[in-house]
Image (tube, rainbow, N blue to C red):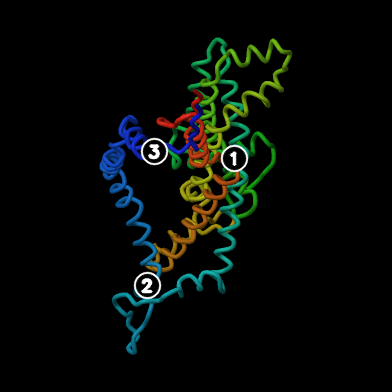
Amino acid sequence: MTTTYDGTPPAADTAAAGAARPGGRDVQGTKRLAALLLSPTLLVLALVIGYPVLAGFRESLYARGEGLDANGFVVQGERFAGLDNYTAIFHGDRGDAFWNAFGNTTFFTVTTVVLETVIGVGMALIMQQAFRGRGLVRASILVPWAIPTAISGLLWRWIFQADGAANAVLRHQILWTADGFQAKIAVVIAEVWKTSPFIGLLVLAGLQMIPREVHEAARVDGAGPLQRFRRITLPLVRPALLVAVLFRMLDVLRMFDLPAVLIGVNQKSVETLTMIAWFEASNLRYGSAAAYATILFLYIALIAYLFVKLLGADIIGEARQHSKRTRRNRPVKGRRKKVTA
């Protein structure tokens, strides 16, 4: 006698399997507990990030103290300006200043992050090696990152003076702190010197997570140092490197203090979007300042999104695919097979 089932478990067996499945009845309780545990963090993020963003966007839609009444006095209070603060950014003198600051911000971001990545990876490889005095070398490499940015700017301003150490070494008179392309180079040098150790520190943490057996096996197979770096070190350290590069990109896009201290404010060659927003706010044009800040926020969000999508791993997508594969390969309790008697 042969009995055949179509693979669909009966209702009774399904209910029994659901009741027997570990934690099957506590799914809703687990979700509620997770939401309860996450609520303090979400509340803090809403207060610290969400509210300032919304308040800044609201401020960008208003103008305050920019109009005159019939007697020539400044109109008190605020008036709704709509998108006037945004459209004014792209026209006239403000438009020229905006695109100049936008170009400077992008130039500093691309140049410094590329140089810091190359130098930081080199620092991490040096700090990972076992040699006498490694602790002293690690400490000396991390010292520039520990120095406050304002102090670092003053230090490099002294170096880049007309009679400073830079011109003495080059034996050529260069006005580093004057408005011009040389000021950009001075800012790039100072920024790379200060923040390359940050990338080196994160990459070093990633290097120390790589098992030694992997390199030893590759060495036994005849792989050279360059091949091991390309095939083993770089792919395994990639997550830490991407996080470090993303943090540096977001930080440089908000650059203000270093060029302001090293070169000075209102210098077209080093003026950034943050500087323009600060200048508008210092002149009590808060609506225009908020508009600049909102545009900078959108620019940073776009760069971060593209960076994660183009270079970063889709962790959520991979986790979902792994979960689907696990559920697909997991045997279903209560499923009856073909029985032959």
List the residue tagged with mark 3.
Answer: 10
Q: Nearer the viewer, mark 3 or mark 1?
A: 3
The dot on residue 62 is 2
Measured in 3D between alpha carbons, the distance from the residue under mark 1 to the one under mark 2, in whole angstroms, is 40 Å
* Residue for point 32% across, 80% down: 75
Q: Earlier in the sequence, mark 3 or mark 1?
A: 3
Query: Where does the image place residue 42, in percent across and percent down from the top left?
Result: 31, 47
> Which quadrant would residue 29 be assigned to in this image?
top left
> Which quadrant would residue 96 be assigned to in this image?
bottom right
Whether residue 150 sits left or right of residue 96 in the image: it is left
Compare residues 74 and 156 and report the one nearer the observer: 74
Measured in 3D between alpha carbons, the distance from the residue under mark 3 to the one under mark 2, in whole angstroms, is 65 Å
**Disc 3 + disc 1, Cβ < 8 Å:** no
Whether residue 50 sits left or right of residue 308 in the image: it is left
Q: Earlier in the sequence, mark 3 or mark 2?
A: 3
* Residue for point 36% across, 34% down: 13
Measured in 3D between alpha carbons, the distance from the residue under mark 3 to the one under mark 1, in whole angstroms, is 72 Å
Query: Where does the image place residue 195, in percent across and percent down from the top left?
Result: 52, 36
Q: Is residue 162 shown to the viewer in this render?
A: no
Position of 316 relative to 60 (above/below) = above
List the residue tagged with mark 1.
Answer: 189
Position of 230 relative to 242 (above/below) = above
Q: Earlier in the sequence, mark 1 or mark 2?
A: 2
* Residue for point 56% across, 12% down: 130
Residue with the most extreme bottom position: 70
Q: Nearer the viewer, mark 1 or mark 2?
A: 2
Compare residues 223 and 192 and report the one nearer the observer: 223
